[in-house]
Every structure is written in structure tokens, then in C-alpha cells.
Image (cartoon, coloured by chain):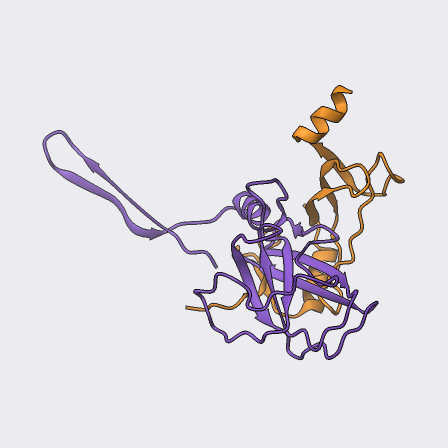
């Protein structure tokens, strides 16, 4: 859910006021929900890109951690570095759901990939969603693939 | 305050009272979105062709979520591959596409 409130009042020249609305619940239209999903998840334009990069780590996340700014131990090498969604992130119109996914192919060995996060650029940038896998990957060797899918319900 | 993702909600096929269809069950969600019409659901995505680098905005019919959450969507650029049934692709003007079209 995305809650919002509307307040408004008339202030007349004679100093009297009329309150038209005071923290009254508003309504989010279907059109703007679709636009929000585009802006947040599916947009790939430089500078306004949505959160459609996926990163993974062998470091278990201590959650909740709403003040996170990075993904601890983010893997940057051997095929499991941060990658843009492929196939591209998509949004189902008229709904609150978008999908961001990527399949990474290991070109080296990993002990145990345990968590993932989304970002809005290929390096640095703002971390979006973060979560631990329910269970770690266990050992990965060159040629193994890791498919990570984020189903993101907003609004 | 919840800090977790919420249920799937459909806002264009509501009940008689105007309440959105809501479920956390992927099978129910797939069934709802596959059968709901007027208007049908579409998938929208912004996408860059790996071969030519052109950027597209694509619309295609609803794809069911798989058991692993994946939709298994695949795109092929109209210039580089075969046209795809049911996919509407609009080339997005970027500095790169403008330069290519000037040549």
C-alpha cells in the first residue's frame, strides 16, 4: 500500500479560513502506479534508471537493516558480479507487480552465495531491495549458473 | 509498519465494490491475470538490444510467473532478429539511436 493524505484550506482576504480537507486519504490512480513501477524498476535510462541491477554476496545479511547503503561482501568477480536484469525487468500493467531477474554464470569457484540485493546502477549507487536466500547455494564451480528473481510488489 | 513486500494486487479487475483482486498465491495470480479481460494485462519493459545497442520500450501479453518467480520473457530486436508475435516495440530515442539514424 502507498498511503497519502490531502489537506487544503481557503484563506479569505478578511482573514477567515475554511478547511476543505485535513489529512484526508487520497487515491493512487492505476496510471501513476504503472508509472511508478516504470520509474522504480523497469526504466533503463541513464541517470533515472530503476532498480534493475542485481548483486549477490556470500555474506549473510543481518535483517532488518533499513539503513543499509551497500551489500556487504558484494561479489564483483568470476561471473557473479552485479548485472543488469536479463531478460529486462518487466511490469504487469494495472497491477502492483514487477519482475527483475538475472542468470549469472560462475567462471570461478564460490563457497556459498547466500543473499542478493537490487541497485540502480552498475557500480556504487543506491541499494534497493535486499534479502537472504532461504538457503545458500553451496559450492559453485565454473560453469554453474545462479538465477535470481525479484518479484517486487509496490502499491 | 510492514517492511516486507506485500501481496499481488490487480487494480483493473476489481470486485463489485471496487476492491482490488488480492492474493499471495502465485497460481491464483496467474489464473486471474491470464483470464481477466477488458482490458487484458500487458507486460511492459524497457530493453536494450545486446547486438545493436538500440533501446526499446516493449509491450507484450501477460506472462505467467513460474514456480521460481521467473517470467521467462525473451526479447529480440526487430532489426536484429525475427519479429515476435504479440510484441509491440517502440524504439526509444537516445543519443546512441540518434547518432545511428543520422549515419
Examine the image and state in which quarter residue B78 appears: top right
Query: Which chain gets the purple colouring?
Result: A
With B82 as the anchor, is B28 left or right in this view?
left
* Relative to B40, residue B25 above or below: below
The tint of chain B in the picture is orange
Q: Is residue B85 visible?
A: yes
Q: Position of residue A37 (x, y in %)?
A: 57, 49
Q: Nearer the viewer, residue A93 or A103?
A: A103
Where A55 sits versus B86, above or below? below
Give the quadrant of residue A103. bottom right
Q: Position of residue A35 (x, y in %)?
A: 56, 44
Q: Residue at x 47, y 64 (%)?
A: A68
Query: Which residue corresponds to the image point at 61% horizontal and 44% vertical from the top-left?
Result: A43
Residue B94 place in picture, x, y as percent: 66, 31
**For the image shown, how many numbered marks are present on the structure?**
0
* Residue lying at 68% horizontally and 68% vertically, measured from the top left: B26
- For residue A94, above or below residue A130: above
Q: Please report the residue visible at 56 percent of the width from the left and 56 percent of the height from the top.
A: B16
Q: Nearer the viewer, residue B48 or A83?
A: A83
Q: Relative to A128, does residue B94 appear above or below in the rendering?
A: above
Q: Nearer the viewer, residue A115 or B2?
A: A115
Outermost residue toward the left in this view: A14
Amino acid at each position: 500500500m502507498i498511503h497519502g493524505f490531502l489537506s487544503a484550506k481557503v484563506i479569505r482576504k478578511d482573514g477567515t479560513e475554511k478547511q476543505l480537507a485535513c489529512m484526508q486519504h487520497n487515491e493512487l490512480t492505476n496510471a501513476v502506479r504503472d508509472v511508478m513501477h516504470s520509474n522504480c524498476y523497469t526504466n533503463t535510462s541513464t541517470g533515472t534508471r530503476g532498480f534493475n541491477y542485481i548483486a549477490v554476496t556470500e555474506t549473510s545479511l543481518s535483517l532488518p537493516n533499513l539503513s543499509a547503503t551497500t551489500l556487504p561482501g558484494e561479489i564483483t568477480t568470476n561471473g557473479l558480479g552485479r548485472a543488469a536484469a536479463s531478460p529486462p525487468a518487466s511490469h504487469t500493467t494495472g497491477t502492483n507487480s514487477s519482475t527483475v531477474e538475472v542468470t549469472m554464470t560462475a567462471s570461478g569457484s564460490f563457497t556459498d552465495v547466500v543473499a542478493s540485493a537490487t541497485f540502480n546502477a552498475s557500480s556504487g549507487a543506491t541499494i534497493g531491495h535486499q534479502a537472504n536466500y532461504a538457503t545458500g547455494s553451496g559450492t559453485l564451480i565454473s560453469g554453474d549458473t545462479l538465477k535470481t528473481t525479484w518479484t517486487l510488489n509496490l502499491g | 509498519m510492514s517492511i516486507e513486500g506485500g501481496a499481488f494486487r490487480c487494480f483493473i479487475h476489481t470486485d463489485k465494490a471496487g476492491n482490488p483482486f488480492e492474493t499471495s498465491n502465485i497460481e491464483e495470480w496467474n489464473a486471474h491475470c491470464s483470464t481477466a479481460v477488458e482490458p487484458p494485462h500487458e507486460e511492459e519493459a524497457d530493453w536494450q538490444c545486446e547486438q545493436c545497442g538500440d533501446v526499446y520500450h516493449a509491450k507484450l501479453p501477460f506472462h505467467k510467473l513460474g514456480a521460481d518467480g521467473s517470467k521467462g520473457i525473451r526479447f529480440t530486436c526487430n532489426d536484429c532478429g525475427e519479429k515476435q508475435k504479440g510484441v509491440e516495440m517502440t524504439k526509444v530515442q537516445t543519443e546512441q539511436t540518434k547518432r545511428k539514424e543520422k549515419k
